[in-house]
Image (cartoon, rainbow, N blue to C red):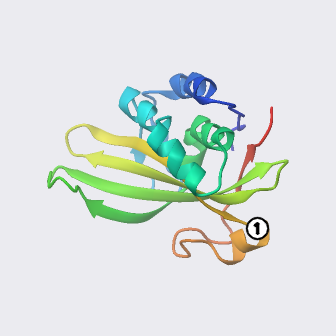
Amino acid sequence: MEKTVYAANNEQATYYLKQQQGKDIKNISDGTIARYGSVGRNKMISNKAREKSLKNGFSPQEHSTAVANIVVLYEYSHMIVERPDRKGNADVTIRYYETSIEFCPSGKCGWAQIMMKMSNIEGNTLYTIELIGIKNKPDLIDEPLSKEAIRASDPIIKLPSEP
């Protein structure tokens, strides 16, 4: 597993995102290859994405850190839902992936949810990420939000909660 990084803010998250932008990222569980460009990068660091994470009990720094680690989070996530495009575009399918996370050394645990836009024309692009739930570490393994997607044998991605 790749080393994870700490990002205190959007500027630091953007620095790490730019290093991987446009590169293929392979999901270990289903083999789907995706990448992200400037649109996905901007959505990940947007106020809307950050506000969703804050609403779910995470700090701005935890959101930025999760964004900075999008590659490892996507690699170790599992698809939980696939749906058609809400605008009716037959060439587009939306997939949601989820993975367990733990911020170290704080010990705060939860889930990161990643949205991927699959397009027959443009390829698969990672679109946004949000932190969706806080749980104690034992609950993370015993009662995941998506039992069909995250199993006790899956890794909990450890993210730094301080520099």
Q: Is residue 5 above or below residue 153?
A: above
Going by the numbered disc 1, the residue's amino acid type is Asn
Residue at horizontal 47 percent and vertical 57 percent from the top: 97
Front in this rendered view, residue 23 or 87: 87
Q: Is residue 33 above or below residue 77?
A: above
Is residue 119 in view?
yes
Q: Quadrant of residue 139?
A: bottom right
Query: Taking 89 as reference, is 118 left or right?
Result: right
Residue at horizontal 45 percent and vertical 35 percent from the top: 24
On the rendered image, what quadrant is the N terminus found in? top right
Residue at horizontal 46 percent and vertical 36 percent from the top: 46
- Total marks shown come to 1
On the rendered image, what quadrant is the C terminus found in? top right
Is residue 26 in view?
no
Residue 156 position within the rendered picture, expressed as x and y whole percent measured from the top left: 70, 58
Residue 127 position within the rendered picture, expressed as x and y whole percent measured from the top left: 39, 42
Query: Taking 160 as reference, is 112 left or right?
Result: left
Query: Taking 119 as reference, is 128 left or right?
Result: right
Q: Quadrant of residue 11?
A: top right
Residue 131 position within the rendered picture, expressed as x and y whole percent measured from the top left: 57, 53
The residue beneath circle 1 is 136
